[in-house]
Image: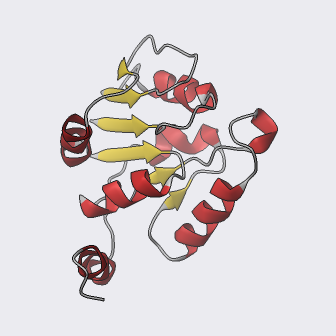
């Protein structure tokens, strides 16, 4: 299953949802659509859910596709998955600036995420499971447990 999360930002992110809805024609996709206007036709979806329900989806997902929100990225990593990150972009009205692109580029260089700069690559990229380097997972665990 592919889990897509756009977080709680009030900006529309229909660009990502439309592309992932095309992927959902041939794969199981569950989407958290937040405040976006697009309503998926092929994927299961919801606007918002409890933290416990979201955690279950992160845990169960084979692949996670998300915006470049810190909480969403950290959640994926906590569950041992490298997320496919599609940054919200200012030019599409998806955010007030391009800080998500900067974050995604930095974390991609560190091997923590897979930056998706071209939405046409999503079908190919979602066909594979990405797992973090074990050293990275141990460092993240230590950080989250307050041991660093």
Q: Nearer the viewer, residue 74 or 59?
A: 74
Q: Which residue shows up at 41% across the image and 51% down it? A: 72
Q: Is 135 left, or right, of 66 in this rendering?
A: left
Q: Is 28 rendered above or below residue 126?
A: above
Exactly how many numbered labels are in the figure? 0
**In the image, residue 119 lies at what x, y percent?**
62, 39
In this picture the colour scheme is secondary structure
Q: Position of residue 87 (x, y in %)?
A: 61, 49
Please identify the quadrant where the N terminus is shown.
Answer: top left
Residue 21 position within the rendered picture, expressed as x and y whole percent measured from the top left: 48, 22
Q: Is residue 76 above or below residue 96?
A: below
- The image shows residue 77, relative to residue 133, as above or below, that is above
Q: Residue at x 33, y 69 (%)?
A: 132
Residue found 32% across the figure and 53% down from its top: 129
* Residue positioned most to the bottom: 148
The answer to which of 47 and 40 lies nearer the viewer is 47
The answer, for residue 130, to whether it is visible in the render is no
Expressed as whole percent of the image width and height from the top left, the position of residue 56 reads 18, 41
Query: Residue drawn 59% across and 61% down?
Result: 104
Task: Judge from the rendering whether residue 20 lies leftward or rightward of residue 105; answer left or right.
Answer: left
Q: Quadrant of the C terminus?
A: bottom left
Toward which corner of the image does residue 130 lie, by quadrant? Answer: bottom left
The quadrant where residue 139 appears: bottom left
């Amino acid at each position: 299953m592919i889990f897509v999360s756009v977080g709680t930002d009030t900006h529309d992110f229909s660009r990502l949802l439309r592309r992932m809805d095309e992927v959902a024609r041939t794969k199981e996709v569950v989407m958290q659509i937040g405040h976006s206007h697009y309503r998926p036709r092929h994927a299961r979806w919801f606007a918002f859910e409890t933290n416990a329900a979201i955690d279950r989806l992160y845990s169960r997902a084979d692949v996670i596709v998300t915006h470049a929100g810190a909480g969403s990225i950290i959640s994926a990593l906590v569950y041992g998955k490298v997320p496919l990150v599609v940054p919200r972009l200012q030019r599409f009205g998806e955010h007030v600036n391009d800080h998500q692109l900067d974050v995604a580029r930095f974390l991609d260089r560190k091997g923590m995420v897979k930056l998706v700069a071209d939405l046409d690559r999503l079908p190919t990229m979602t066909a594979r499971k990405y797992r973090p380097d074990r050293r990275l997972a141990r460092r993240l665990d230590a950080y989250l447990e307050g041991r660093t």
